[in-house]
Amino acid sequence: MPKNLAQKLDTPFQREVYEGLTAYPKYISSKYIYDKAGDKLFQDIMNMPEYYLTDTEFGILETHKEQLARLFANGKNPFHLIEMGAGDGKKTKILLRHFTDKNLNFTFRPIDISQNALDSLQSNLKQEIPDVQTEPLQGTYFETLRKLNFSTDEHKVILFLGSNIGNLLHEKAIEFLSQIQEYMQPKDLLFIGFDQKKNPQTILDAYNDPNGITERFNKNLLVRINRELEANFKLDSFTHWEVYDPESGTAKSYLVATSPQKVRIEKLDLDITFEAWETIHTEISQKYDDKTVHWLAEQSGLKVLKAFSDQEDYYKNYLFTTSV
């Protein structure tokens, strides 16, 4: 990117859209799908019958909430419950209600890139579980990692639910986990959801539903670019496409141009040309097995303490501690 142009692009959204659409092949991070409309569409996705991830993790948390309360509290010690990518907090509320009923001494610190999601979550918690002390923090995962290392004698329990770790390829996942590990003390815990490898068709159905909700979610990226960066993407000229590689466990989402076209993005002073069937890579959703998770932990200075699974082993939540 030319230096004089980089100085004009003063937001991460502007810079990353410019960099992604001038690269080959083209790409844009899925994190920018999440505005008010994107948040609502993702809630709709989580309620789809094909999207098994939500119900399986709900079941795991409900089944094991008593054991998790004992592990997280480590006796009756006060702790900070830090959730990265909190969203609407529906699953976390299972734990928050149970922990409150058990009179555990904790502070809930939800973190999300969407301020709208945090505002909604905090408002709902005041009504539903008013006794929970909540301190929200807006930002991306990597921006907020630096703020997690607050000075306190209370231990930290960091949640990363919904298999959000799957949005990172293994190299980036190790980098991400290593950064978290750097801020963990010996008594701190890390609790992460990992979607497991399974029948490939089950995975494809979860990301390519017949009602087109996932397609509208993916295309919300173009809607946001049109609105905020004054672009003229024609949504009907792109189609949503999902692929899954059972060997690597990687599912990928694309927006595919169905015809040759030219797009103008006024706020970037940028014209982008698409050939027919050219792609914009928007998201990955990595799937795992036990061997891979233990390898990621080893590479990141972490150790698996315990794994919690649903009956079909579709999904697992792993509890880690630092091994350093």
Image: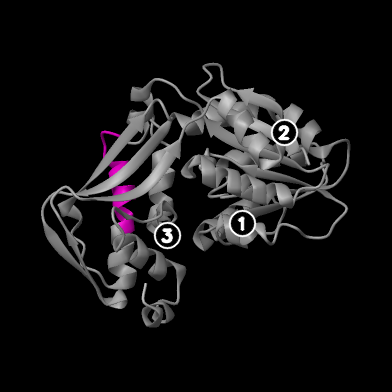
Q: Is residue 73 above or below residue 146?
A: above
Residue type at mark 2 is Lys
Where is mark 2, residue-wise? 303
Q: CA distance from mark 3 to mark 2?
A: 35 Å
Q: Secondary structure at mark 1?
A: helix
Lateral position of residue 17 relative to residue 90, left or right: left
Q: Residue at x 31, y 34 (%)?
A: 243
Label at residue 122: 1
Question: Mark 3, residues whose alpha carbon is within 10 Å: few (<14), some, or many (≥20)?
Answer: some
Q: Residue at x 41, y 54 (%)?
A: 29
Whichever of callouts 2 and 1 sits on the residue coming sooner in the sequence is 1
Quarter occupied by the N terminus: bottom left
Whichever of callouts 3 and 2 sits on the residue coming sooner in the sequence is 3
Magenta-colored stretch includes residue 277: no
Q: Position of residue 315 (x, y in %)?
A: 53, 26
Q: CA distance from mark 2 to mark 1?
A: 32 Å
Q: Are marks 3 and 1 in contact (CB under 8 Å)?
A: no
What range of the chain is rendered magenta?
Answer: 209-221
Where is mark 3, residue-wise? 35
Asked if residue 46 can be seen in this view, the reply is no
Q: Secondary structure at mark 2?
A: strand
Residue that protrudes farthest toward the left in the picture:
259
Q: Is residue 173 above or below residue 9?
A: above
Residue that protrudes farthest toward the top in the picture:
311
Q: Are marks 2 and 1 in contact (CB under 8 Å)?
A: no
